[in-house]
Amino acid sequence: MTQMTNMRLAVEQELQEIFREFFPTESSDLRSMLFYHMGWEGAGSGPEAQGKRIRPLLVLLCGASAGGDWHRALPAAAAVEIVHNFSLIHDDIEDSSVLRRGRATVWNQWGSAQAINAGDAMFSLAPLALARLEPSLGSSVAMEAIRILFHTAVQLTRGQYLDMAFETENQVSISSYWEMVGGKTASLLAASAELGALCAGADELLRKGYRTFGWNLGLAFQALDDLLGIWGDEVELGKSTSSDLTTGKKTLPVLYGLELQGEFSQRWLAGPISPNEAFQAAQMLEKDGAREYTQSMADRLTQEALASLDRVIVDRATGMELQSLAMQLLKRNR
């Protein structure tokens, strides 16, 4: 087995131990909702329903590449994945999304009110997971990990708030967009990278380097996701590429097109774009240079992320695996 395969299996075991410790009763509906969302139970359960576990792998690979024993960072890796999945449960409610990873979402199965309870329960497990760092790494590391992750949770929630608030705002600047995606997407990847370095015993300067890597990686991911949301392959993505335009979502290419005040901007401001008009609207955007601009931003941020990583890697072999994981993240949606 490769190191990354071993890490993925260890993360899954750590997560299940935490969930089973606090939700041991199989007859509990709350337990069923949590285990269903994590991809462990219910129709369609299995690896595909569990997701790629990118964020916990990022924690472990950053820890190993910083010269630490990745096994010691497993509680932090689990905590990051728990916070990520808490955000997914609540996002699905807020976005009225009926599917997640090819299965019915928790709110679609159990109703919005109980899904909120499930998300809250999920969030509550994160500090309990981080407390498992104390026996091997000490209380000061565990407390610093809690500070990092819960500061990130504030950023994450604020980013989601801004994303929703932008839906009703007529004008949103590109700088405001970066503020939003910094919270919604980049902050948790940055925290994942820093937590790995923290668990490896890295000093503050090295931790900052890993955090910068994760931050730029997150921004690059979101820019590329926005590009694919309009010009991607629908079969590969598993979703419509017209929805970002027809729902009025203010993605990076859309905001770039609006700032130019050209043909696309005039059509956008005239009213909602119908599914039949989406292809033509995408052509207008591409003609305005929005596709090229978005790709160039994604490429620049990717290079900045990899450059930051190159400056802090201690273990080169693991660093190569970390680069591979970063590129995997940039090829597909979460």
Image (spheres, rainbow, N blue to C red):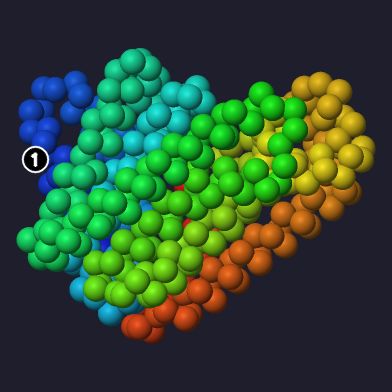
Residue at x-position 43% and y-position 64% = 211
Q: Quadrant of the N terminus?
A: bottom left
Residue at x-position 49% and y-position 53% = 186
The three-letter amino acid code for the residue at tag 1 is Glu
Counting every numbered tag in the picture gives 1
In the image, residue 293 above or below residue 314: above
Q: Which residue is mark 1?
A: 21
Residue at x-position 34% and y-position 36% = 86
In the image, residue 200 above or below residue 38: below
| SS for dot 1 | helix
Left or right, residue 32 beside residue 155:
left
Left or right, residue 78 beside residue 324:
left
Mark yes or no: residue 327 visible.
yes
The 10 Å Cα crowd at callout 1, few under 14, some 14 to 19, many 20 or more, is few
Left or right, residue 268 beside residue 200:
right
Q: Position of residue 43 (x, y in %)?
A: 30, 30
| Along the line of sight, the residue nearer the viewer: 76 or 51 | 76
Classify residue 69 by image quadrant. bottom left
In the image, residue 333 above or below residue 196: above
Q: Position of residue 332 (x, y in %)?
A: 53, 53
Q: Position of residue 64 (x, y in %)?
A: 29, 74
Residue at x-position 72% and y-position 42% = 173
* Residue farthest along the right direction in this orientation: 263
| Along the line of sight, the residue nearer the viewer: 319 or 241 | 319
Q: Position of residue 166 (x, y in %)?
A: 64, 31
Mark yes or no: residue 1 visible.
no
| Along the line of sight, the residue nearer the viewer: 121 or 212 | 212
